Image (cartoon, grey):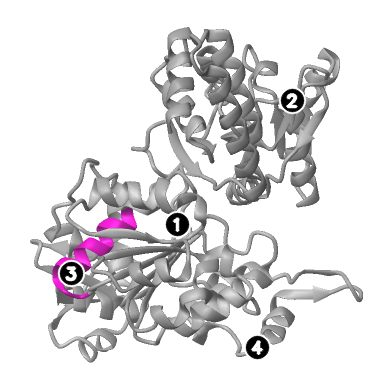
Amino acid sequence: MEIIEDRGLLVRVRDQEKITNAIQQSRYMGCDENGTDKVLVKWTLDNARKLANLGLRRTPSPILRDYNWPGVFKPYDHQRQTASFLTANNRAFCFSEQGTGKTGAVIWAADYLMNLGDVKRVLIISPLSIMHSAWMTDIFKIAMHRRAAVAHGTRETRKKVINGNYDFVIINYDGIPLVENELKGKFDLVVADEANFVKTATTRRWKALNRIVSPETKLWMLTGTPAAQSPADAYGLAKLAVPQRVPPYFTSWKNRVMVRLSQFKWVPAPDATRLVNAALQPAIRYTKADCLDLPPITYVTREIELTAQQKKYYKQLKKQMLIEAAGESISAVHAAAGLNKLLQISCGAAYSDDGETVQFDAKNRLDEVSEVVQEASHKVIVFVPFRHAIDIVADRLRKDGFSTEIVNGSVSMKARTKIFRDFQESDDPRVLVVQPQSASHGVTLTAADTIVWFGPVASVETWLQANERINRPSQENKMTVIKIYGSEVEKRVYDALESKETNQKTLVALYEQELKS
Protein backbone atom coordinates (compact mmCIF):
# COMPACT_ATOMS: atom_id res chain seq x y z
CA MET A 1 0.00 0.00 0.00
CA GLU A 2 1.36 3.40 -1.03
CA ILE A 3 0.60 6.86 0.36
CA ILE A 4 0.05 9.31 -2.49
CA GLU A 5 0.79 13.01 -1.80
CA ASP A 6 -0.42 12.61 1.81
CA ARG A 7 -3.99 12.52 0.48
CA GLY A 8 -4.66 9.08 -0.91
CA LEU A 9 -3.85 5.39 -0.48
CA LEU A 10 -2.98 3.38 -3.56
CA VAL A 11 -4.14 -0.16 -2.90
CA ARG A 12 -3.29 -3.18 -5.05
CA VAL A 13 -5.85 -6.00 -4.91
CA ARG A 14 -7.02 -8.86 -7.09
CA ASP A 15 -10.63 -7.69 -7.08
CA GLN A 16 -11.07 -3.91 -7.21
CA GLU A 17 -14.83 -4.13 -6.62
CA LYS A 18 -14.14 -5.44 -3.11
CA ILE A 19 -12.98 -1.90 -2.29
CA THR A 20 -14.96 0.33 -4.67
CA ASN A 21 -18.24 -1.21 -3.54
CA ALA A 22 -17.38 -0.70 0.15
CA ILE A 23 -15.75 2.75 0.01
CA GLN A 24 -17.46 5.58 -1.81
CA GLN A 25 -14.31 7.74 -1.81
CA SER A 26 -12.35 5.32 -4.00
CA ARG A 27 -11.51 5.08 -7.69
CA TYR A 28 -10.33 2.23 -9.90
CA MET A 29 -6.98 3.14 -11.49
CA GLY A 30 -6.51 0.19 -13.87
CA CYS A 31 -4.05 -2.71 -13.59
CA ASP A 32 -0.33 -2.79 -12.96
CA GLU A 33 2.16 -4.78 -15.05
CA ASN A 34 1.25 -7.95 -13.13
CA GLY A 35 -2.45 -7.62 -13.83
CA THR A 36 -3.27 -6.56 -10.26
CA ASP A 37 -6.04 -4.00 -9.81
CA LYS A 38 -5.06 -0.57 -8.47
CA VAL A 39 -7.53 1.45 -6.41
CA LEU A 40 -6.99 4.98 -5.10
CA VAL A 41 -8.73 5.64 -1.77
CA LYS A 42 -9.06 9.02 -0.07
CA TRP A 43 -6.92 8.88 3.08
CA THR A 44 -9.24 9.39 6.03
CA LEU A 45 -9.52 7.54 9.32
CA ASP A 46 -12.93 6.16 8.36
CA ASN A 47 -11.62 4.83 5.06
CA ALA A 48 -8.51 3.39 6.73
CA ARG A 49 -10.78 1.47 9.11
CA LYS A 50 -12.90 0.21 6.22
CA LEU A 51 -9.79 -1.07 4.46
CA ALA A 52 -8.65 -2.74 7.68
CA ASN A 53 -12.05 -4.40 8.03
CA LEU A 54 -11.68 -5.71 4.47
CA GLY A 55 -8.57 -7.59 5.60
CA LEU A 56 -5.92 -4.97 4.77
CA ARG A 57 -4.85 -4.88 8.40
CA ARG A 58 -1.69 -2.83 8.05
CA THR A 59 -3.54 0.07 6.44
CA PRO A 60 -1.81 3.28 7.60
CA SER A 61 -3.88 5.64 9.71
CA PRO A 62 -3.84 9.42 9.06
CA ILE A 63 -2.37 9.77 12.55
CA LEU A 64 0.94 9.51 10.66
CA ARG A 65 0.05 12.66 8.73
CA ASP A 66 -2.03 14.74 11.14
CA TYR A 67 -0.78 14.16 14.67
CA ASN A 68 1.85 16.28 16.44
CA TRP A 69 3.00 13.55 18.91
CA PRO A 70 3.06 15.63 22.12
CA GLY A 71 5.07 15.02 25.27
CA VAL A 72 8.65 14.88 26.44
CA PHE A 73 9.46 11.76 24.38
CA LYS A 74 10.02 11.53 20.66
CA PRO A 75 8.17 8.43 19.43
CA TYR A 76 10.19 5.64 17.87
CA ASP A 77 9.15 4.55 14.40
CA HIS A 78 7.69 1.28 15.69
CA GLN A 79 5.58 3.25 18.20
CA ARG A 80 4.22 5.41 15.36
CA GLN A 81 3.36 2.29 13.39
CA THR A 82 1.74 0.67 16.44
CA ALA A 83 -0.37 3.79 17.07
CA SER A 84 -1.32 3.84 13.40
CA PHE A 85 -2.40 0.20 13.54
CA LEU A 86 -4.44 0.65 16.71
CA THR A 87 -6.30 3.74 15.47
CA ALA A 88 -7.18 1.93 12.24
CA ASN A 89 -8.66 -1.03 14.14
CA ASN A 90 -11.41 -0.68 16.74
CA ARG A 91 -10.63 -4.18 18.02
CA ALA A 92 -6.97 -5.16 17.96
CA PHE A 93 -4.17 -7.05 19.67
CA CYS A 94 -0.66 -5.71 20.30
CA PHE A 95 1.75 -8.57 20.99
CA SER A 96 4.98 -6.57 21.05
CA GLU A 97 7.64 -7.65 23.52
CA GLN A 98 8.02 -5.96 26.88
CA GLY A 99 10.34 -3.00 26.66
CA THR A 100 9.19 -1.90 23.20
CA GLY A 101 7.08 1.04 24.39
CA LYS A 102 3.52 -0.29 24.02
CA THR A 103 2.28 2.08 26.72
CA GLY A 104 3.44 5.18 24.89
CA ALA A 105 1.99 4.01 21.57
CA VAL A 106 -1.41 3.44 23.18
CA ILE A 107 -1.45 6.86 24.86
CA TRP A 108 -0.59 8.67 21.62
CA ALA A 109 -3.20 6.64 19.71
CA ALA A 110 -5.90 7.35 22.31
CA ASP A 111 -5.03 11.06 22.45
CA TYR A 112 -5.30 11.30 18.65
CA LEU A 113 -8.76 9.73 18.70
CA MET A 114 -9.79 12.10 21.52
CA ASN A 115 -8.64 15.06 19.40
CA LEU A 116 -10.98 13.86 16.65
CA GLY A 117 -13.88 13.30 19.04
CA ASP A 118 -13.84 9.61 18.07
CA VAL A 119 -13.08 8.66 21.69
CA LYS A 120 -14.22 10.56 24.77
CA ARG A 121 -12.91 8.47 27.68
CA VAL A 122 -10.42 5.62 28.02
CA LEU A 123 -10.42 2.84 30.60
CA ILE A 124 -7.01 1.26 31.09
CA ILE A 125 -6.96 -2.08 32.89
CA SER A 126 -3.56 -3.19 34.14
CA PRO A 127 -1.83 -5.09 36.93
CA LEU A 128 -1.45 -3.13 40.15
CA SER A 129 2.30 -2.93 39.69
CA ILE A 130 2.23 -0.65 36.65
CA MET A 131 -0.84 1.52 37.26
CA HIS A 132 1.29 4.35 38.64
CA SER A 133 4.84 3.52 37.55
CA ALA A 134 3.97 2.93 33.88
CA TRP A 135 0.57 4.32 32.95
CA MET A 136 0.20 7.39 35.16
CA THR A 137 3.85 8.33 34.65
CA ASP A 138 3.68 8.01 30.86
CA ILE A 139 0.33 9.81 30.56
CA PHE A 140 1.83 12.71 32.53
CA LYS A 141 4.90 12.81 30.27
CA ILE A 142 3.12 12.20 26.95
CA ALA A 143 -0.39 13.63 27.31
CA MET A 144 0.03 16.16 30.10
CA HIS A 145 -2.96 18.07 28.70
CA ARG A 146 -5.22 15.12 29.63
CA ARG A 147 -6.69 14.35 33.03
CA ALA A 148 -5.90 10.90 34.44
CA ALA A 149 -6.50 9.08 37.71
CA VAL A 150 -6.11 5.64 39.25
CA ALA A 151 -9.30 3.97 40.47
CA HIS A 152 -7.96 1.95 43.38
CA GLY A 153 -8.82 1.56 47.03
CA THR A 154 -12.30 1.31 48.51
CA ARG A 155 -15.33 0.86 46.29
CA GLU A 156 -16.39 4.45 46.98
CA THR A 157 -12.95 5.76 46.07
CA ARG A 158 -13.04 3.84 42.80
CA LYS A 159 -16.55 5.09 42.00
CA LYS A 160 -15.52 8.68 42.62
CA VAL A 161 -12.69 8.39 40.10
CA ILE A 162 -14.81 6.56 37.52
CA ASN A 163 -17.51 9.23 37.73
CA GLY A 164 -14.98 12.07 37.80
CA ASN A 165 -13.94 14.31 34.95
CA TYR A 166 -11.00 12.17 33.79
CA ASP A 167 -9.97 11.35 30.23
CA PHE A 168 -8.00 8.28 31.34
CA VAL A 169 -9.08 6.05 34.22
CA ILE A 170 -6.70 3.28 35.28
CA ILE A 171 -7.97 0.28 37.22
CA ASN A 172 -6.58 -3.13 38.16
CA TYR A 173 -8.13 -6.35 36.87
CA ASP A 174 -9.58 -7.47 40.19
CA GLY A 175 -11.12 -4.03 40.64
CA ILE A 176 -13.43 -4.49 37.64
CA PRO A 177 -15.97 -6.80 39.36
CA LEU A 178 -16.10 -4.44 42.36
CA VAL A 179 -17.39 -1.50 40.29
CA GLU A 180 -18.75 -3.24 37.23
CA ASN A 181 -22.05 -1.33 37.18
CA GLU A 182 -20.25 2.00 37.47
CA LEU A 183 -18.02 1.18 34.51
CA LYS A 184 -20.80 0.22 32.09
CA GLY A 185 -21.40 2.74 29.35
CA LYS A 186 -18.82 5.28 30.55
CA PHE A 187 -15.86 4.40 28.30
CA ASP A 188 -15.74 4.05 24.54
CA LEU A 189 -12.16 2.69 24.50
CA VAL A 190 -10.93 -0.07 26.82
CA VAL A 191 -7.24 -1.04 26.94
CA ALA A 192 -6.37 -4.38 28.55
CA ASP A 193 -2.66 -4.34 29.42
CA GLU A 194 -0.94 -7.67 30.14
CA ALA A 195 -4.12 -9.22 28.82
CA ASN A 196 -3.18 -12.74 29.92
CA PHE A 197 -4.88 -11.74 33.18
CA VAL A 198 -8.15 -12.45 31.32
CA LYS A 199 -7.12 -15.45 29.24
CA THR A 200 -9.57 -17.74 31.08
CA ALA A 201 -13.20 -17.13 30.21
CA THR A 202 -14.55 -18.75 33.38
CA THR A 203 -12.97 -16.29 35.81
CA ARG A 204 -14.84 -13.54 37.62
CA ARG A 205 -12.64 -10.81 36.15
CA TRP A 206 -13.16 -12.10 32.56
CA LYS A 207 -16.92 -12.22 32.95
CA ALA A 208 -17.05 -8.73 34.45
CA LEU A 209 -14.91 -7.29 31.65
CA ASN A 210 -17.01 -9.06 29.03
CA ARG A 211 -20.14 -7.43 30.44
CA ILE A 212 -18.72 -3.89 30.33
CA VAL A 213 -17.40 -4.22 26.76
CA SER A 214 -20.37 -3.65 24.44
CA PRO A 215 -20.24 -4.40 20.69
CA GLU A 216 -19.57 -0.68 20.08
CA THR A 217 -16.68 -0.45 22.57
CA LYS A 218 -13.21 -0.18 21.11
CA LEU A 219 -10.91 -2.76 22.71
CA TRP A 220 -7.14 -3.00 22.45
CA MET A 221 -5.49 -5.98 24.18
CA LEU A 222 -1.78 -5.94 24.97
CA THR A 223 0.50 -8.84 25.90
CA GLY A 224 3.94 -9.95 24.84
CA THR A 225 3.15 -13.66 25.23
CA PRO A 226 -0.25 -14.66 23.83
CA ALA A 227 -1.11 -18.33 24.46
CA ALA A 228 2.44 -18.94 25.73
CA GLN A 229 1.55 -21.86 27.98
CA SER A 230 -1.10 -23.50 25.80
CA PRO A 231 -2.92 -22.73 22.53
CA ALA A 232 -6.12 -23.20 24.52
CA ASP A 233 -5.30 -19.92 26.33
CA ALA A 234 -6.03 -17.93 23.16
CA TYR A 235 -9.73 -18.60 23.61
CA GLY A 236 -10.38 -16.09 26.40
CA LEU A 237 -8.58 -13.26 24.59
CA ALA A 238 -10.31 -13.91 21.27
CA LYS A 239 -13.71 -14.41 22.89
CA LEU A 240 -13.45 -10.93 24.46
CA ALA A 241 -12.17 -8.99 21.46
CA VAL A 242 -13.24 -10.90 18.35
CA PRO A 243 -15.77 -13.54 19.45
CA GLN A 244 -16.67 -14.30 15.82
CA ARG A 245 -13.23 -15.88 15.36
CA VAL A 246 -13.70 -18.68 17.93
CA PRO A 247 -16.46 -21.21 18.65
CA PRO A 248 -19.16 -20.31 21.19
CA TYR A 249 -17.81 -22.80 23.72
CA PHE A 250 -14.32 -23.40 25.07
CA THR A 251 -14.54 -27.20 24.70
CA SER A 252 -14.95 -26.87 20.94
CA TRP A 253 -11.89 -24.61 20.76
CA LYS A 254 -9.80 -26.93 22.93
CA ASN A 255 -10.69 -29.89 20.71
CA ARG A 256 -9.50 -27.90 17.69
CA VAL A 257 -6.11 -26.82 19.05
CA MET A 258 -5.25 -29.67 21.43
CA VAL A 259 -4.90 -33.45 21.11
CA ARG A 260 -5.79 -35.66 24.05
CA LEU A 261 -3.17 -38.31 24.80
CA SER A 262 -4.63 -39.58 28.06
CA GLN A 263 -7.19 -38.61 30.67
CA PHE A 264 -5.00 -35.82 32.03
CA LYS A 265 -2.53 -35.11 29.22
CA TRP A 266 -3.18 -32.83 26.25
CA VAL A 267 -0.65 -31.63 23.67
CA PRO A 268 -0.95 -28.95 20.95
CA ALA A 269 -2.49 -30.09 17.68
CA PRO A 270 -0.24 -29.96 14.58
CA ASP A 271 -2.00 -26.86 13.22
CA ALA A 272 -2.50 -25.16 16.62
CA THR A 273 -0.16 -22.26 15.82
CA ARG A 274 -2.04 -21.45 12.62
CA LEU A 275 -5.42 -21.61 14.38
CA VAL A 276 -4.23 -19.37 17.22
CA ASN A 277 -2.77 -16.84 14.79
CA ALA A 278 -6.01 -16.77 12.84
CA ALA A 279 -8.10 -16.29 15.99
CA LEU A 280 -5.99 -13.50 17.47
CA GLN A 281 -6.41 -11.01 14.64
CA PRO A 282 -6.01 -8.20 13.80
CA ALA A 283 -2.65 -8.09 15.56
CA ILE A 284 0.68 -6.29 15.46
CA ARG A 285 3.94 -7.41 17.02
CA TYR A 286 7.41 -5.93 17.33
CA THR A 287 10.27 -7.71 19.01
CA LYS A 288 13.07 -5.71 20.55
CA ALA A 289 15.27 -6.98 17.72
CA ASP A 290 12.87 -5.34 15.23
CA CYS A 291 13.16 -1.97 16.96
CA LEU A 292 16.48 -0.73 15.64
CA ASP A 293 15.91 2.71 17.16
CA LEU A 294 15.45 1.45 20.71
CA PRO A 295 18.23 2.16 23.21
CA PRO A 296 20.26 -0.96 24.02
CA ILE A 297 18.90 -1.04 27.59
CA THR A 298 15.41 0.00 28.70
CA TYR A 299 14.85 0.59 32.42
CA VAL A 300 11.36 -0.13 33.77
CA THR A 301 10.02 0.58 37.27
CA ARG A 302 7.22 -1.50 38.78
CA GLU A 303 5.58 -0.57 42.06
CA ILE A 304 4.32 -3.62 43.97
CA GLU A 305 2.21 -3.03 47.05
CA LEU A 306 3.55 -4.59 50.24
CA THR A 307 1.32 -7.22 51.78
CA ALA A 308 -0.57 -6.45 54.98
CA GLN A 309 1.99 -8.42 57.00
CA GLN A 310 4.93 -6.58 55.45
CA LYS A 311 3.26 -3.21 56.10
CA LYS A 312 2.69 -4.12 59.73
CA TYR A 313 6.30 -5.03 60.49
CA TYR A 314 7.68 -2.24 58.32
CA LYS A 315 5.69 0.26 60.37
CA GLN A 316 6.80 -1.32 63.65
CA LEU A 317 10.45 -1.18 62.63
CA LYS A 318 10.20 2.47 61.59
CA LYS A 319 8.70 3.29 65.00
CA GLN A 320 11.57 1.50 66.72
CA MET A 321 14.12 3.32 64.55
CA LEU A 322 12.51 6.66 65.39
CA ILE A 323 12.85 5.96 69.12
CA GLU A 324 16.48 4.90 68.72
CA ALA A 325 17.32 8.03 66.71
CA ALA A 326 15.64 10.48 69.08
CA GLY A 327 18.18 13.01 70.35
CA GLU A 328 21.12 11.09 68.90
CA SER A 329 23.37 11.91 65.97
CA ILE A 330 22.90 9.30 63.27
CA SER A 331 26.04 7.56 62.02
CA ALA A 332 26.35 6.07 58.55
CA VAL A 333 26.71 2.62 60.12
CA HIS A 334 23.51 3.12 62.12
CA ALA A 335 21.66 4.44 59.05
CA ALA A 336 22.85 1.56 56.85
CA ALA A 337 21.71 -1.04 59.41
CA GLY A 338 18.25 0.52 59.74
CA LEU A 339 17.74 0.91 56.01
CA ASN A 340 18.96 -2.62 55.43
CA LYS A 341 16.33 -4.01 57.79
CA LEU A 342 13.55 -2.08 56.02
CA LEU A 343 14.78 -3.35 52.66
CA GLN A 344 14.81 -6.92 53.99
CA ILE A 345 11.19 -6.71 55.14
CA SER A 346 10.25 -5.29 51.71
CA CYS A 347 11.88 -8.31 50.07
CA GLY A 348 10.08 -10.82 52.28
CA ALA A 349 12.67 -12.13 54.74
CA ALA A 350 14.80 -10.63 57.50
CA TYR A 351 17.23 -11.73 60.20
CA SER A 352 16.06 -11.62 63.79
CA ASP A 353 18.34 -10.42 66.60
CA ASP A 354 19.38 -14.00 67.33
CA GLY A 355 20.31 -14.67 63.68
CA GLU A 356 17.22 -16.62 62.69
CA THR A 357 15.54 -15.92 59.35
CA VAL A 358 12.01 -14.55 59.64
CA GLN A 359 9.89 -14.87 56.51
CA PHE A 360 7.11 -12.46 55.57
CA ASP A 361 4.28 -12.80 53.11
CA ALA A 362 5.73 -11.41 49.85
CA LYS A 363 3.09 -12.83 47.50
CA ASN A 364 2.55 -9.61 45.55
CA ARG A 365 6.21 -9.30 44.64
CA LEU A 366 6.57 -12.99 43.83
CA ASP A 367 3.50 -12.82 41.57
CA GLU A 368 5.12 -9.98 39.67
CA VAL A 369 8.41 -11.81 39.14
CA SER A 370 6.54 -14.84 37.84
CA GLU A 371 4.59 -12.64 35.42
CA VAL A 372 7.78 -11.00 34.14
CA VAL A 373 9.41 -14.38 33.50
CA GLN A 374 6.27 -15.54 31.71
CA GLU A 375 6.27 -12.43 29.49
CA ALA A 376 10.00 -12.57 28.66
CA SER A 377 10.98 -13.90 25.23
CA HIS A 378 14.44 -14.97 26.39
CA LYS A 379 16.11 -16.03 29.63
CA VAL A 380 15.87 -13.97 32.80
CA ILE A 381 18.17 -13.10 35.69
CA VAL A 382 16.54 -12.19 39.01
CA PHE A 383 18.88 -10.31 41.34
CA VAL A 384 17.87 -10.74 44.99
CA PRO A 385 20.01 -8.61 47.32
CA PHE A 386 19.38 -10.64 50.48
CA ARG A 387 20.51 -14.22 50.70
CA HIS A 388 17.62 -15.31 52.89
CA ALA A 389 15.08 -14.22 50.23
CA ILE A 390 16.75 -16.08 47.36
CA ASP A 391 15.23 -19.47 48.23
CA ILE A 392 11.77 -17.92 48.48
CA VAL A 393 12.03 -16.54 44.94
CA ALA A 394 13.54 -19.71 43.46
CA ASP A 395 10.94 -21.96 45.10
CA ARG A 396 8.11 -19.87 43.69
CA LEU A 397 9.53 -19.88 40.15
CA ARG A 398 10.06 -23.64 40.23
CA LYS A 399 6.53 -24.11 41.51
CA ASP A 400 5.33 -22.09 38.49
CA GLY A 401 7.17 -24.42 36.13
CA PHE A 402 10.31 -22.42 35.30
CA SER A 403 13.65 -24.23 35.38
CA THR A 404 15.61 -22.22 37.93
CA GLU A 405 19.08 -22.27 39.46
CA ILE A 406 20.46 -20.33 42.44
CA VAL A 407 23.82 -18.58 42.63
CA ASN A 408 24.91 -17.15 45.97
CA GLY A 409 27.98 -17.06 48.16
CA SER A 410 27.53 -20.66 49.33
CA VAL A 411 27.65 -22.10 45.79
CA SER A 412 31.14 -23.38 45.02
CA MET A 413 33.13 -21.90 42.14
CA LYS A 414 33.00 -25.21 40.29
CA ALA A 415 29.20 -25.47 40.63
CA ARG A 416 28.80 -21.79 39.79
CA THR A 417 30.83 -22.20 36.59
CA LYS A 418 28.64 -25.11 35.48
CA ILE A 419 25.44 -23.20 36.20
CA PHE A 420 26.65 -20.21 34.18
CA ARG A 421 27.78 -22.45 31.30
CA ASP A 422 24.44 -24.29 31.20
CA PHE A 423 22.59 -20.98 31.31
CA GLN A 424 24.56 -19.71 28.30
CA GLU A 425 24.64 -22.90 26.22
CA SER A 426 21.59 -25.03 27.11
CA ASP A 427 17.82 -24.59 27.24
CA ASP A 428 17.83 -24.97 31.01
CA PRO A 429 17.89 -23.21 33.35
CA ARG A 430 15.56 -20.51 32.05
CA VAL A 431 16.01 -18.36 35.16
CA LEU A 432 18.95 -17.56 37.44
CA VAL A 433 18.16 -16.24 40.92
CA VAL A 434 21.35 -14.52 41.93
CA GLN A 435 22.80 -12.70 44.90
CA PRO A 436 24.21 -9.66 43.03
CA GLN A 437 27.66 -9.79 44.62
CA SER A 438 28.06 -13.37 43.33
CA ALA A 439 27.83 -12.39 39.67
CA SER A 440 28.70 -8.73 39.46
CA HIS A 441 32.15 -9.09 37.91
CA GLY A 442 33.63 -10.94 34.95
CA VAL A 443 30.63 -13.15 34.11
CA THR A 444 28.91 -13.15 30.72
CA LEU A 445 25.20 -14.01 30.87
CA THR A 446 23.99 -12.80 27.48
CA ALA A 447 21.54 -15.69 27.07
CA ALA A 448 19.30 -13.39 29.14
CA ASP A 449 17.97 -10.11 27.85
CA THR A 450 15.96 -9.30 30.98
CA ILE A 451 17.12 -8.49 34.51
CA VAL A 452 14.69 -8.23 37.41
CA TRP A 453 15.77 -6.54 40.63
CA PHE A 454 13.69 -8.10 43.41
CA GLY A 455 14.85 -5.19 45.54
CA PRO A 456 17.63 -2.61 45.35
CA VAL A 457 21.21 -3.25 46.38
CA ALA A 458 23.04 -0.61 48.42
CA SER A 459 26.21 -0.46 46.30
CA VAL A 460 26.49 1.58 43.11
CA GLU A 461 29.38 -0.57 41.90
CA THR A 462 27.42 -3.80 42.41
CA TRP A 463 24.36 -2.26 40.70
CA LEU A 464 26.31 -1.15 37.63
CA GLN A 465 28.39 -4.30 37.33
CA ALA A 466 25.42 -6.65 37.81
CA ASN A 467 23.47 -4.92 35.03
CA GLU A 468 26.49 -5.31 32.75
CA ARG A 469 26.30 -9.13 32.95
CA ILE A 470 23.82 -9.14 30.04
CA ASN A 471 25.26 -6.06 28.29
CA ARG A 472 28.30 -7.75 26.76
CA PRO A 473 29.63 -7.94 23.17
CA SER A 474 27.89 -11.31 22.54
CA GLN A 475 24.43 -9.88 23.38
CA GLU A 476 22.16 -10.16 20.34
CA ASN A 477 18.97 -8.68 21.84
CA LYS A 478 17.79 -5.37 23.22
CA MET A 479 17.78 -5.53 27.02
CA THR A 480 15.33 -4.65 29.78
CA VAL A 481 16.12 -3.97 33.45
CA ILE A 482 13.04 -4.09 35.69
CA LYS A 483 13.22 -2.47 39.13
CA ILE A 484 10.65 -3.71 41.65
CA TYR A 485 9.80 -1.69 44.72
CA GLY A 486 6.99 -1.59 47.26
CA SER A 487 8.29 0.78 49.92
CA GLU A 488 9.36 4.39 49.74
CA VAL A 489 12.85 3.55 50.98
CA GLU A 490 13.36 1.15 48.07
CA LYS A 491 12.34 3.83 45.59
CA ARG A 492 14.80 6.27 47.15
CA VAL A 493 17.63 3.73 47.02
CA TYR A 494 16.96 3.08 43.32
CA ASP A 495 17.02 6.84 42.70
CA ALA A 496 20.35 7.06 44.53
CA LEU A 497 21.76 4.15 42.50
CA GLU A 498 20.77 5.74 39.21
CA SER A 499 22.33 9.03 40.23
CA LYS A 500 25.37 7.03 41.40
CA GLU A 501 25.11 8.34 44.95
CA THR A 502 25.12 5.78 47.74
CA ASN A 503 27.90 7.23 49.87
CA GLN A 504 27.74 7.65 53.65
CA LYS A 505 26.15 11.08 53.43
CA THR A 506 23.42 9.72 51.17
CA LEU A 507 22.69 6.81 53.52
CA VAL A 508 22.17 9.16 56.45
CA ALA A 509 19.92 11.41 54.34
CA LEU A 510 17.84 8.43 53.19
CA TYR A 511 17.49 7.24 56.78
CA GLU A 512 16.31 10.67 57.96
CA GLN A 513 13.85 11.00 55.06
CA GLU A 514 12.33 7.63 55.86
CA LEU A 515 11.83 8.51 59.52
CA LYS A 516 10.08 11.74 58.57
CA SER A 517 7.78 10.14 55.98
Q: Earlier in the sequence, mark 1 or mark 4?
A: 4
For image coordinates 33% across by 66% down, the residue present is: 86
The tag on residue 387 is 2
Q: Which residue is mark 3?
A: 9
Q: Is residue 38 visible?
A: yes
Principal secondary structure, stretch drawn in magenta: helix
Q: Earlier in the sequence, mark 4 or mark 3?
A: 3
Q: Earlier in the sequence, mark 3 or mark 2?
A: 3
Q: Is residue 485 left or right of residue 407?
A: left
* Element carrying mark 3: strand
Marker count (numbered): 4
Q: Which residue is mark 4?
A: 249
Q: Earlier in the sequence, mark 1 or mark 3?
A: 3
- Give the CA separation, mark 2 to mark 1: 38 Å
Of badges 1 and 3, nearer the viewer stands 1
Tell me if label 1 and label 4 are in contact, CB under 8 Å. no
What residue type is disc 3 on? Leu
Q: Within 10 Å of the Cα at label 2, are there few (<14), some (14-19), or many (20+) other Cα atoms?
A: some
Q: Position of residue 181 (x, y in %)?
A: 44, 83
- Give the CA separation, mark 4 to mark 3: 40 Å
Q: Is residue 446 visible?
A: no
Looking at the rendering, which quadrant does residue 306 occupy?
Answer: top right
Please give the range of residues in magenta: 105-118
Q: Which residue is mark 1?
A: 285
Quadrant containing the C terminus is top left
Of badges 4 and 3, nearer the viewer stands 4
